[in-house]
Image (cartoon, helix red, strand yellow):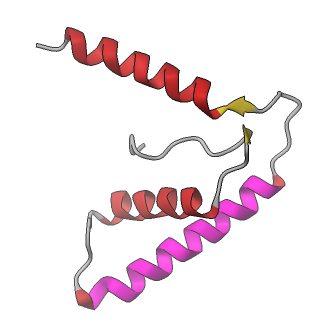
Amino acid sequence: MCRNIHTLYNFEPEATRDEVEAAALQYVRKISGFTKPSQANAAAFERAVHEVAHATEHLLEALVTNAPPKDREVVAAKARERAAKRYATAS
């Protein structure tokens, strides 16, 4: 899976439309192999981003859990800590 796609479910506050769109864009970029599509593929690319975002919103609305919502700041701090350890040991 693409490293730039992050979990959007069960956070407080909920994922924004921009976050859903960004995840959809990353997904479509990954599976298409295009960072920026040609003019010939731009319409299909944008349509795919819109459709993936739409499906993602429906999925997030339909999911249920008994787990308490995660705190975005705590998750981000843990990710920064993991990255610091990973890159500090890299040669």
Residue 26 covered by magenta stretch: no
- In the drawing, does residue 82 fall left or right of residue 9? left
Give the residue drawn at x 83%, y 28%: 67
Corner quadrant of residue 36? bottom left
Residue 7 in the image: above or below residue 68:
below
Give the residue drawn at x 22%, y 83%: 38
Residue 76 coordinates in the image, percent (x, y): 52, 29
Instruction: Please identify the quadrant where the C terminus is shown.
Output: top left
Residue with the most extreme left position: 91
Residue 89 in the image: above or below residue 14:
above
Corner quadrant of residue 26? bottom left
Give the residue drawn at x 26%, y 65%: 35
Residue 52 coordinates in the image, percent (x, y): 56, 67
Residue 47 in the image: above or below residue 71:
below
Instruction: Please identify the quadrant where the N terminus is shown.
Output: top left
Residue 57 covered by magenta stretch: yes
- In the drawing, does residue 79 fall left or right of residue 38? right
Corner quadrant of residue 46? bottom left
The part of the chain drawn in magenta is 40-61
- In the drawing, does residue 33 fall left or right of residue 65? left
Residue 55 coordinates in the image, percent (x, y): 66, 66
Give the dominant element type of the magenta stretch: helix, strand or loop: helix
How many numbered discs, if any?
0
